[in-house]
């Protein structure tokens, strides 16, 4: 069974890559489209600013719940089943949101969508990393993460198209309705994508009582990720993702405002957003290609340092007026450097998957990532609160993300290197924090 993870045809591997790529792209579309449409939604449903904020908050809160629930689901009932369930839920939430009639209905429907969105990333990443070539996991995962830039660009384009093509009452509804496309992706997954054979093999041993005693007596995966060596990895993983997300949101949410203050028009903002999306996409692909050679630590650490440099540059150039062209605007140059630095997120999927055994892998990956996203959601409230202390300068208040980035960098340094690690059906439960090192996974028990 040791070689079971490699028994996939190229067609099966391609179907998993395509499914997870499209799933994550549509996931990001569903998150960002509401941001771009909120003005129209507020006006049509007569929402207050506080209510609009709650819509965003409940979506993020739902994603945390979804990550935990569907992470457990993936360990107990299968990776493929978990991915299909998450796609069904956030598709349903997206479609229902398009037919909202007031604040309460929209709040409930976005909560449903948020729960589904929270589970999709972990389910897709775990399945992909158990199916893909272990020597190319970093590259493949970065391709999937690059789908976020496509989802972002799609949200920008659809929001503008829907808002200018249809009347105000229907434009935002049609844009949200498009977010229900994953329903079609579910059909493709059902008939084309394989289940993880690694998980299937483990599940067979579990059903027949053939697991080692420590595996048979293990508690829920959601508890096991906080026991033994897994606790060490879980805590560091949460610090890494939380620091990254806080630093990310402390910049991404406020850059449109910074550029608007400098004199940028909505058309300029759209142009900059699309340039950023294209630049980050190239950054993901480039980082992914080299990550499997230089290792997870370097592939996370170098981009984080780059993002820190970018934020410092943003602070020094934020007060300059828009020069009339985005191509000679220093602020945009630093913004792009920061954006390339955010590509370290492409390593979260393979690194966390390589740290945990199969029976708790889905719970660990999903819980770590969504908990970090939840912590990062504090940044949009923290930055404005710090503006008075920063002398009224929004760009200076955004620097609060730097300590968070430093925490992420320190957490990455403390995690063991795992690039190229083999997966086994049964792995040693008690392992030291450094035992994940080694391309062949020699520190893990195999059958």
Image (spheres, rainbow, N blue to C red):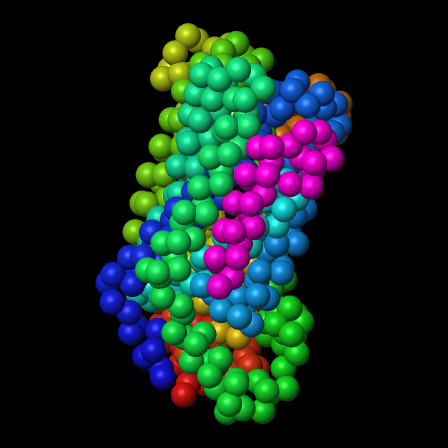
Q: Residue at x 61, y 50 (%)?
A: 115
Q: Give the main secondary structure, helix, strand or loop, of the magenta stretch.
A: helix
Q: Quadrant of residue 363?
A: bottom right
Look at the image and give the residue range highlighted in magenta.
81-109
Q: Is residue 168 above or below residue 13?
A: above
Q: Quadrant of residue 384?
A: top right
Evaluate whether residue 309 shows in this view. Answer: no
Q: In this orientation, which residue lies closer to the viewer: 58 or 328?
A: 58
Q: Residue at x 55, y 77 (%)?
A: 432
Q: In this orientation, which residue lies closer to the viewer: 408 or 59?
A: 59
Quadrant of the image containing the C terminus: bottom left
Instruction: Say left or right for 307 vs 242.
Output: left
Q: Is residue 118 above or below residue 74?
A: above
**Residue 301, how many percent across, how many down?**
46, 50
Evaluate whether residue 218 shows in this view. Answer: yes
Q: Quadrant of residue 251?
A: top right
């Amino acid at each position: 069974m040791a070689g079971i993870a490699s028994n996939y045809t190229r067609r099966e591997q391609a179907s998993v890559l395509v499914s997870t790529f499209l799933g994550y792209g549509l996931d990001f579309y569903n998150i960002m489209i509401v941001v771009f449409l909120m003005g129209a939604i507020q006006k049509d449903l007569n929402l207050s600013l506080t209510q609009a904020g709650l819509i965003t908050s409940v979506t993020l809160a739902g994603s945390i719940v979804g990550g935990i629930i569907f992470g457990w689901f993936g360990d107990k009932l299968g990776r493929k089943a978990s991915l299909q369930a998450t796609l069904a839920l956030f598709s349903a939430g997206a479609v229902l949101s398009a037919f909202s009639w007031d604040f309460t209905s929209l709040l409930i429907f976005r909560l449903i969508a948020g729960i589904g969105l929270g589970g999709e990333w972990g389910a897709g990443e775990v399945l992909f990393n158990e199916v893909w070539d272990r020597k190319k996991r970093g590259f493949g995962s970065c391709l999937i993460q690059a789908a976020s830039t496509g989802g972002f660009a799609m949200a920008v384009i659809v929001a503008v198209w829907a808002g200018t093509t249809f009347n105000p009452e229907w434009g935002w509804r049609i844009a949200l309705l498009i977010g229900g496309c994953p329903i079609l992706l579910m059909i493709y997954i059902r008939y084309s994508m394989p289940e993880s054979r690694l998980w299937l093999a483990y599940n067979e041993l579990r059903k027949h009582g053939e697991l080692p005693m420590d595996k048979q007596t293990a508690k829920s995966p959601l508890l096991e990720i906080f026991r033994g060596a897994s606790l060490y990895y879980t805590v560091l993983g949460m610090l890494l993702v939380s620091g990254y997300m806080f630093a990310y949101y402390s910049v991404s949410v406020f850059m449109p405002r910074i550029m608007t203050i400098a004199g940028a028009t909505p058309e300029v903002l759209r142009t900059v957003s699309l340039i950023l999306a294209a630049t980050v996409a190239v950054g993901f692909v480039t980082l992914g290609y080299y990550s499997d050679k230089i290792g997870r630590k370097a592939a996370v650490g170098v981009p984080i340092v780059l993002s820190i440099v970018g934020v410092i540059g943003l602070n020094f150039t934020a007060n300059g007026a828009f020069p009339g062209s985005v191509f000679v605007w220093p602020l945009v140059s630093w913004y792009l450097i920061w954006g390339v630095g955010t590509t370290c997120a492409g390593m979260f999927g393979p690194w966390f998957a390589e740290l945990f055994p199969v029976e708790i892998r889905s719970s660990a990956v999903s819980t770590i990532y969504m908990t970090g996203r939840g912590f990062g959601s504090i940044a949009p409230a923290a930055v404005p609160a710090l503006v008075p202390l920063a002398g009224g300068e929004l760009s200076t208040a955004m620097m609060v993300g730097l300590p968070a980035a430093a925490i992420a960098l320190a957490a990455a340094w403390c995690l063991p290197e795992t690039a190229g690690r083999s997966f086994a059906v049964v792995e040693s439960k008690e392992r030291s924090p450094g035992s994940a090192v080694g391309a062949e996974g020699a520190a893990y028990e195999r059958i």
